[in-house]
Image (cartoon, helix red, strand yellow):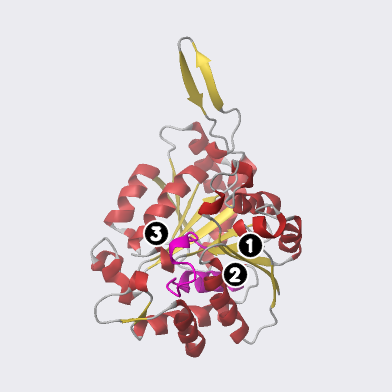
Amino acid sequence: MRVAVLPGDGIGPEIVSQACRVLQKLDLKVQLQTAPVGGAGIEAAGHPLPPETLRLAKEADAILFGAVGDPRYDNLERAKRPEQAILGLRKALGLFANLRPAQVYPELAAASSLRPELVAGLDLLIVRELTGDIYFGQPKGIRSKGAEREGFDTMLYSESEVRRIARVAFEAARRRSRRVCSVDKANVLETSQLWREVLTEESRSFGDVELSHMYVDNCAMQLVRNPKQFDVIVTGNLFGDILSDEASMLTGSIGMLPSASLDANNKGLYEPIHGSAPDIAGKNLANPLATILSAAMMLRYSFNQDQAADRIEAAVAKVLARGLRTADIHQAGTQQIGTVQMGDAVVAAL
């Protein structure tokens, strides 16, 4: 299993190194190769996504990604900034399906902004289409119309784009509780009407998975009213961008949340959802658990190593049950530890 390890900037190297320790602890044949990306790529080769890094990512079976972003490069033109590395990887590798789980461990339920009884035991997955929709539809721009300017964007989905993200959601649901809720705005948008029709058609090939539909405004309300009603949510790029961030706050800390971006063959880029946090870089303060859990997702989705993924997730649960916490999830009555010590604890739990 060839893994391209791209630590990136800020806390990226610290958290990725702990995830690599966990992978190496497992009895698996994993080959890890590291390359610079983001600000580190600019330093090494003058570009946020150096050609050698992109080559390694293309040749690998999966990519373990840390975080990019460094204020030292904020004055560069947009195409040369560290954040462009992740966009370049998505485009070059055809990563169209974003999987973002939101899971609340019982010990962390009190950290949520919602009442503990609403989120304790929460385990949902948002599947977001990543390469279409209003973000990429053409035409778009700003133009003059009479005495004023107007901005315009095109919301666009082809049937094949909807069909392939639907299949990702149904397959993911088969690993879970076999329920998919498709989120759209079919009462207003023609794009969503097509989306709903194709989801319904595709569901006939997955008779063992229950499909329901929900308007996006209702879904946004239900996520804070009764989030545990959901298993898998599948939606487009715009709605998924908003809903996945809303769901992340249900858990209390973005330091706990992994993600995956997959291509048509389940090759994926796996990363924590948080940023590079340069203000705490090098201080042994960052929470590595989201990155460690991203490594578990990598084993599950790209390598079909469900048992190994289960072991990592169980080890994380065991560490939390012992009361060990990094600063972002520390509460009274628990023991605060650093990045390396949290990695030590997960490795020991394995």
Tell me the residue at 51%/86% (across/down). 347
Q: Secondary structure at mark 1?
A: strand
Q: Secondary structure at mark 2?
A: helix
Q: Nearer the viewer, residue 328 or 244?
A: 328
Residue annotated with mark 2: 298
Marks 1 and 3, how far apart at CA: 20 Å
Please state the extent of the stretch shown in magenta in the rendering: 272-299
Residue annotated with mark 1: 268
Tell me the residue at 27%/61% (across/down). 113
The x and y percentages for residue 66 are 56, 65
> Which residue in the rendered view is the most extreme toward the top?
146
In which quadrant will I find the N terminus? bottom right
Q: Residues within 10 Å of mark 2 (few under 14, many from 20)?
A: many
Q: Where is 306 relative to 249, above or below?
A: below
Residue 114 makes an appearance in the image: yes
Precedes in sequence: disc 2 or disc 3: 3
Q: Where is 135 relative to 303, above or below?
A: above
